[in-house]
Image (cartoon, rainbow, N blue to C red):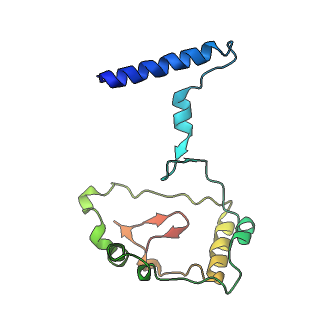
Amino acid sequence: MYSLAQCTALNNIRESVEYFCRGSNGSFKPPCWDTEVRERKIDYNGDESTHALPIVLEELKPCLPSPGLAGSVLAASLAAPHVCDWLENPDKFLLPKDQWPTTVPKATVQVTSDQEYYSIIQYLRELGIVEFIDYADIFEVDGTKVLNGLFPEG
Protein backbone atom coordinates (compact mmCIF):
# COMPACT_ATOMS: atom_id res chain seq x y z
CA MET A 1 0.00 0.00 0.00
CA TYR A 2 2.80 2.47 0.91
CA SER A 3 6.21 2.64 -0.73
CA LEU A 4 9.38 1.99 1.27
CA ALA A 5 10.12 5.74 1.26
CA GLN A 6 6.62 6.56 2.54
CA CYS A 7 6.88 3.92 5.30
CA THR A 8 10.26 5.28 6.35
CA ALA A 9 8.96 8.87 6.42
CA LEU A 10 5.86 7.88 8.43
CA ASN A 11 7.99 5.91 10.87
CA ASN A 12 10.34 8.88 11.36
CA ILE A 13 7.38 11.20 11.96
CA ARG A 14 5.82 8.74 14.43
CA GLU A 15 9.09 8.38 16.35
CA SER A 16 9.59 12.16 16.45
CA VAL A 17 6.07 12.73 17.75
CA GLU A 18 6.49 10.05 20.40
CA TYR A 19 9.82 11.58 21.47
CA PHE A 20 8.24 15.03 21.66
CA CYS A 21 5.28 13.75 23.69
CA ARG A 22 7.55 11.85 26.13
CA GLY A 23 9.47 15.04 26.84
CA SER A 24 6.33 17.01 27.64
CA ASN A 25 5.71 15.25 31.00
CA GLY A 26 2.16 14.53 29.94
CA SER A 27 1.23 18.22 29.68
CA PHE A 28 1.01 18.07 25.89
CA LYS A 29 -2.08 16.56 24.36
CA PRO A 30 -1.85 16.07 20.59
CA PRO A 31 -4.73 17.66 18.67
CA CYS A 32 -7.47 15.65 17.05
CA TRP A 33 -6.24 15.89 13.48
CA ASP A 34 -9.63 15.06 11.96
CA THR A 35 -11.10 18.11 13.70
CA GLU A 36 -8.11 20.32 12.87
CA VAL A 37 -8.30 19.49 9.17
CA ARG A 38 -12.08 19.92 9.06
CA GLU A 39 -11.96 23.32 10.80
CA ARG A 40 -9.03 24.82 8.90
CA LYS A 41 -9.35 26.25 5.42
CA ILE A 42 -6.55 26.88 2.94
CA ASP A 43 -6.76 29.63 0.33
CA TYR A 44 -5.46 29.55 -3.24
CA ASN A 45 -1.99 30.62 -2.06
CA GLY A 46 -1.72 27.74 0.41
CA ASP A 47 -2.16 30.07 3.38
CA GLU A 48 -4.56 29.32 6.21
CA SER A 49 -7.72 31.37 5.95
CA THR A 50 -10.29 32.10 8.60
CA HIS A 51 -14.05 32.19 8.57
CA ALA A 52 -15.53 35.08 6.64
CA LEU A 53 -16.79 38.00 8.69
CA PRO A 54 -19.78 40.07 7.61
CA ILE A 55 -19.05 43.05 5.36
CA VAL A 56 -20.10 46.25 7.14
CA LEU A 57 -20.26 49.46 5.12
CA GLU A 58 -18.90 51.69 7.90
CA GLU A 59 -15.88 49.37 8.27
CA LEU A 60 -15.42 49.22 4.49
CA LYS A 61 -15.54 52.99 3.85
CA PRO A 62 -12.03 53.82 5.17
CA CYS A 63 -10.58 51.28 2.70
CA LEU A 64 -12.30 52.80 -0.32
CA PRO A 65 -11.20 55.76 -2.46
CA SER A 66 -12.71 59.18 -1.97
CA PRO A 67 -15.79 60.02 -4.06
CA GLY A 68 -14.78 60.99 -7.58
CA LEU A 69 -11.41 59.27 -7.33
CA ALA A 70 -12.45 55.72 -8.25
CA GLY A 71 -12.41 54.68 -11.83
CA SER A 72 -12.71 51.60 -13.88
CA VAL A 73 -10.55 50.12 -16.55
CA LEU A 74 -11.53 47.52 -19.10
CA ALA A 75 -9.62 44.46 -17.95
CA ALA A 76 -8.99 43.37 -21.54
CA SER A 77 -7.06 46.61 -22.20
CA LEU A 78 -4.41 45.51 -19.67
CA ALA A 79 -4.46 41.73 -20.10
CA ALA A 80 -2.20 39.46 -22.10
CA PRO A 81 -3.70 38.33 -25.43
CA HIS A 82 -4.66 34.83 -24.24
CA VAL A 83 -6.35 36.32 -21.17
CA CYS A 84 -8.18 38.86 -23.36
CA ASP A 85 -9.78 35.96 -25.18
CA TRP A 86 -11.10 34.59 -21.85
CA LEU A 87 -12.44 38.01 -20.88
CA GLU A 88 -14.00 38.88 -24.21
CA ASN A 89 -15.32 35.41 -25.12
CA PRO A 90 -16.12 33.59 -21.86
CA ASP A 91 -18.65 31.29 -23.54
CA LYS A 92 -15.79 29.66 -25.49
CA PHE A 93 -14.29 28.45 -22.21
CA LEU A 94 -17.33 26.93 -20.54
CA LEU A 95 -17.33 23.21 -19.94
CA PRO A 96 -19.76 21.27 -22.12
CA LYS A 97 -23.21 21.46 -20.54
CA ASP A 98 -23.24 17.74 -19.75
CA GLN A 99 -20.29 18.40 -17.38
CA TRP A 100 -22.03 21.17 -15.42
CA PRO A 101 -23.21 20.48 -11.86
CA THR A 102 -26.81 19.32 -11.60
CA THR A 103 -27.63 22.23 -9.29
CA VAL A 104 -26.20 25.73 -9.57
CA PRO A 105 -23.83 26.33 -6.63
CA LYS A 106 -25.03 29.10 -4.35
CA ALA A 107 -22.68 31.65 -2.85
CA THR A 108 -23.47 33.30 0.45
CA VAL A 109 -23.10 37.01 1.01
CA GLN A 110 -21.55 37.80 4.36
CA VAL A 111 -23.57 40.83 5.48
CA THR A 112 -25.59 41.51 8.60
CA SER A 113 -28.83 42.27 6.76
CA ASP A 114 -30.39 42.88 3.36
CA GLN A 115 -30.39 46.62 4.16
CA GLU A 116 -26.62 46.50 4.77
CA TYR A 117 -26.14 44.65 1.47
CA TYR A 118 -28.08 47.28 -0.49
CA SER A 119 -26.26 50.11 1.32
CA ILE A 120 -22.89 48.63 0.33
CA ILE A 121 -23.91 48.17 -3.30
CA GLN A 122 -25.35 51.68 -3.53
CA TYR A 123 -22.23 53.23 -1.99
CA LEU A 124 -19.92 51.32 -4.35
CA ARG A 125 -22.05 52.54 -7.25
CA GLU A 126 -21.88 56.14 -6.03
CA LEU A 127 -18.07 55.87 -5.97
CA GLY A 128 -18.04 54.51 -9.54
CA ILE A 129 -16.59 51.16 -8.46
CA VAL A 130 -19.55 49.11 -9.69
CA GLU A 131 -22.33 49.66 -12.15
CA PHE A 132 -25.61 47.88 -12.44
CA ILE A 133 -26.37 45.51 -15.30
CA ASP A 134 -29.71 44.41 -16.62
CA TYR A 135 -31.16 41.42 -14.81
CA ALA A 136 -31.50 39.72 -18.19
CA ASP A 137 -27.71 39.94 -18.69
CA ILE A 138 -26.90 37.76 -15.67
CA PHE A 139 -25.69 34.32 -16.79
CA GLU A 140 -28.15 31.58 -16.00
CA VAL A 141 -28.40 27.82 -16.11
CA ASP A 142 -31.82 26.28 -16.74
CA GLY A 143 -33.52 29.44 -15.50
CA THR A 144 -31.33 29.83 -12.38
CA LYS A 145 -29.13 32.95 -12.22
CA VAL A 146 -25.45 32.28 -11.48
CA LEU A 147 -24.46 34.57 -8.64
CA ASN A 148 -21.03 34.96 -7.11
CA GLY A 149 -21.33 36.30 -3.58
CA LEU A 150 -21.87 40.02 -3.64
CA PHE A 151 -22.07 40.39 -7.42
CA PRO A 152 -23.78 38.43 -10.24
CA GLU A 153 -21.91 36.97 -13.19
CA GLY A 154 -22.62 38.94 -16.34
Judge by depth and name the residue closer to the eye, 99 or 68. Answer: 68
Could you tell me which residue is drawn at 52 percent across and 69 percent down? Answer: 151
Could you tell me which residue is drawn at 70 percent across and 64 percent down? Answer: 56
Could you tell me which residue is drawn at 31 percent across and 58 percent down? Answer: 100
Could you tell me which residue is drawn at 50 percent across and 58 percent down? Answer: 107
Snapshot quadrant of residue 62: bottom right
Question: For the view shown, which residue lies furthest in the bottom direction?
Answer: 68
77 relative to 46, above or below: below
23 relative to 100, above or below: above
Task: Find residue 52 and report its horizontal and vertical position in percent.
Answer: 61, 53
Q: Looking at the figure, which quarter contains the C terminus?
A: bottom left
Q: How many marks?
A: 0
Judge by depth and name the residue closer to the eye, 118 or 38. Answer: 38
Task: Find residue 149 and report its horizontal and vertical position in percent.
Answer: 53, 63
Q: Looking at the figure, which quarter contains the N terminus?
A: top left
Judge by depth and name the residue closer to the eye, 3 or 74. Answer: 3
Snapshot quadrant of residue 91: bottom left
Task: Find residue 34 and report its horizontal and vertical position in percent.
Answer: 51, 29
Task: Find residue 12 and report its horizontal and vertical position in percent.
Answer: 45, 20
> On the rendered structure, is 5 left or right of 40?
left
Judge by depth and name the residue closer to the eye, 100 or 86. Answer: 86
1 relative to 81, above or below: above
